[in-house]
């Protein structure tokens, strides 16, 4: 039977066996190298509660720091597609050859925004054009 991808959707190469992780959404046991991984940093408290804590802080205000939550999220492929963490990319349309980015630099030239290595994500460009209309 033909293979859909050269790497079979994995990055283990010549390893033989890789560790397993649990999917955050469904709990499925999934190979670590095949799982879709995202790193999330969240504040523990919202800004209004943070202000209340800072006002009642007994020590110097310059030393006031609240820790953050650092979460490594692993999803199986089906949950990642369902939750729109990743999208299906067509080989026929050439989407797989293109590397999208959501991190844009604050410059006016679109090639300089991405560093020239990636194409800005289409939905990001649509949102930016709505936020700041171009005047000719």
Image (cartoon, rainbow, N blue to C red):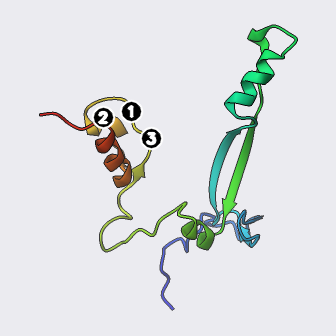
Residue 25 image point, x, y percent? 70, 66
Q: Mark 3 points at which residue?
A: 103
Residue 78 image point, x, y percent? 60, 73
Residue 112 image point, x, y percent? 30, 34
Mark nearer the N terminus (2 vs 3) = 3
Left or right of 7, for residue 91: left
Mark nearer the N terminus (1 vs 2) = 1
Q: Distance between the residues labelled 1 and 3?
A: 7 Å
Q: Name the residue under label 1.
A: 105
Q: Residue at x 69, y 55 (%)?
A: 73
Dot 1 and dot 2 residues touching (CB under 8 Å): yes
Furthest residue to the top? 60
Q: Nearer the viewer, residue 79 or 96?
A: 79
Q: Mark 2 points at which residue?
A: 112
Furthest residue to the right? 58
- Image position of 115 with respect to 79: above or below: above
The kind of secondary structure element at disc 2 is helix
Q: Which residue is drawn at 86% across and 10% down?
A: 59
Q: Nearer the viewer, residue 100 or 48?
A: 48
Q: Distance between the residues labelled 1 and 2?
A: 7 Å
Residue 118 image point, x, y percent? 36, 47
The kind of secondary structure element at disc 1 is loop
Q: Nearer the viewer, residue 24 or 7?
A: 24
Q: Quadrant of the C terminus?
A: top left
Left or right of 77, for residue 106: left
Furthest residue to the left? 136
Q: How crowded is mark 2: few (under 14 residues within 10 Å), some or many (20 or more)?
A: few
**Is residue 42 at least partly visible in the picture?**
yes
Dot 1 and dot 3 residues touching (CB under 8 Å): yes
The kind of secondary structure element at disc 3 is loop
Point out the frontmost of discs 2 and 3: 3
């Amino acid at each position: 039977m033909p293979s859909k991808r050269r790497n079979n959707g994995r990055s283990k190469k010549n390893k033989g066996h890789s560790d397993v992780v649990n999917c955050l959404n469904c709990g499925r046991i999934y190979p670590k190298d095949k799982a879709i991984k995202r790193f999330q940093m969240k504040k523990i408290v919202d800004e209004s509660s943070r202000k209340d804590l800072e006002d009642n802080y007994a020590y110097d205000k310059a030393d006031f720091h609240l820790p953050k939550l650092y979460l490594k999220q692993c999803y199986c492929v089906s949950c990642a597609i369902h939750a729109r963490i990743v999208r299906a990319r067509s080989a026929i349309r050439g989407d797989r050859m293109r590397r999208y980015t959501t991190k844009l630099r604050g410059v006016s030239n679109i090639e300089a925004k991405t560093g020239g290595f990636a194409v800005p994500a289409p939905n990001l460009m649509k949102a930016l054009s709505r936020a700041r209309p171009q005047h000719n």
